[in-house]
Amino acid sequence: MEQARIALAAKPRGVHLITREILAQLPQVADYETGLLHLFLLHTSAGLAINENADPDVRRDTETFADHLIPDGWPGFRHTLEGPDDMPAHLKSMLFGCEVTIPVANGRLALGTWQGIYLVEGRDYGGSRKLVATVWGNSL
């Protein structure tokens, strides 16, 4: 079993494909014949998800729907001291979740052909995001 911290570059609000960014910082995945990779996001205003990795319209549509579902500045929010995007970002984090687990097979993530790992950034300027990555299983 191995554990590492991954730092993601700052991204604007939106849905971002981060699979390559994660794998670039986690070469030890290649050492596992079978296993699991668990990713845990250390933030409360962003989320993780797995979805379509080919058509960028999926990411744009996901962001558009989430922003429509949870709009900035909704008058019922009390938690507003950090700006109008903060409470919506917390809700999006709860909606999408802060962790994903992915199978590892033959030294690679066993994602489907059209699957990728998303960071769902809820803040306009959320800054760098950090993950704890834990990989365990049978070594090659």
Image (cartoon, rainbow, N blue to C red):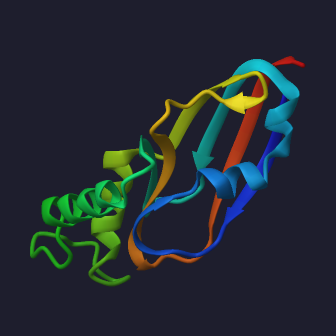
Q: Residue at x 59, y 30 (%)?
A: 102
Return the residue nearer the eye: 69 or 14: 14
Q: Is residue 24 left or right of residue 43?
A: right
Q: Residue at x 21, y 76 (%)?
A: 72
Quadrant for residue 121, please give it. Answer: bottom left
Return the residue nearer the eye: 73 or 103: 103
Quadrant including the N terminus: top right
Quadrant for residue 129, please give it. Answer: bottom right
Residue lying furthest left: 75
Quadrant for residue 29, please give it. Answer: top right
Q: Residue at x 34, y 58 (%)?
A: 59
Quadrant including the C terminus: top right
Q: Position of residue 87 (x, y in %)?
A: 30, 68
Q: Position of residue 90 (x, y in %)?
A: 36, 61
Q: Residue at x 37, y 60 (%)?
A: 56
Return the residue nearer the eye: 109 or 55: 55
Q: Position of residue 95 (x, y in %)?
A: 31, 47
Q: How many marks?
A: 0
Identify whether 4 is placed above or below 90: above
